[in-house]
Image: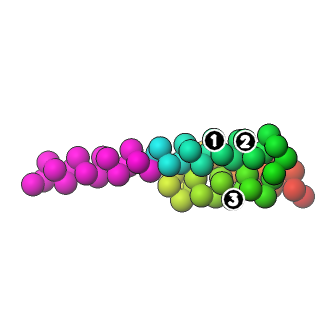
Amino acid sequence: MFCFHLIFLADLEDEKKILSDICVSLAVQFANNKSIDQAIQSYKEALQYNPQHPPILLALADLYMQVQ
């Protein structure tokens, strides 16, 4: 039972990484199309799945600098 529980947690972390990567890909596309608000929202969503990922935080900060 314990091994199954560890595998389940590993799968959950893999799924979070995949979801974060999808959100980042969308954010990049939105930013390239000058849809800055949508890009910011996508980066924020990526942070929900991967909150301490420096490239996401830096990209989001860069977009905020563009807005101001």
Q: What residue type is labelled 3?
A: Gln
- The chosen color scheme is rainbow
Q: Where is residue 16 in the image (x, y as percent from the top left)?
A: 44, 50
Q: Which residue is drawn at 73% across and 52% down?
A: 39
Q: Does the magenta stretch include residue 3?
A: yes
Instruction: Sort mark 1 into few (<14), some (14-19) or many (20+) by Cα contacts within 10 Å.
Output: some
Determine which residue is flagged by label 3: 41
Instruction: Sort mark 3 into few (<14), some (14-19) or many (20+) by Cα contacts within 10 Å.
Output: some
> Is 16 positioned to the left or the right of 2 in the image?
right
Q: Name the image quarter holding residue 31.
A: top right
Q: Residue at x 19, y 54 (%)?
A: 5
Task: Find the distance from the CA under tag 3 to the CA under tag 2.
Answer: 12 Å
Task: Find the distance from the CA under tag 3 to the CA under tag 1.
Answer: 12 Å
What range of the chain is rendered magenta? 1-16
Q: Residue at x 50, y 55 (%)?
A: 49
> Is 32 positioned to the left or the right of 57 in the image?
right
The disc placed on residue 29 is: 2
Q: Name the image quarter holding residue 48.
A: bottom right
Q: Quadrant of the N terminus?
A: bottom left
Determine which residue is flagged by label 1: 25
Instruction: Sort mark 2 into few (<14), some (14-19) or many (20+) by Cα contacts within 10 Å.
Output: some
Q: Main secondary structure of the magenta part?
A: helix
Q: Earlier in the sequence, mark 3 or mark 1?
A: 1
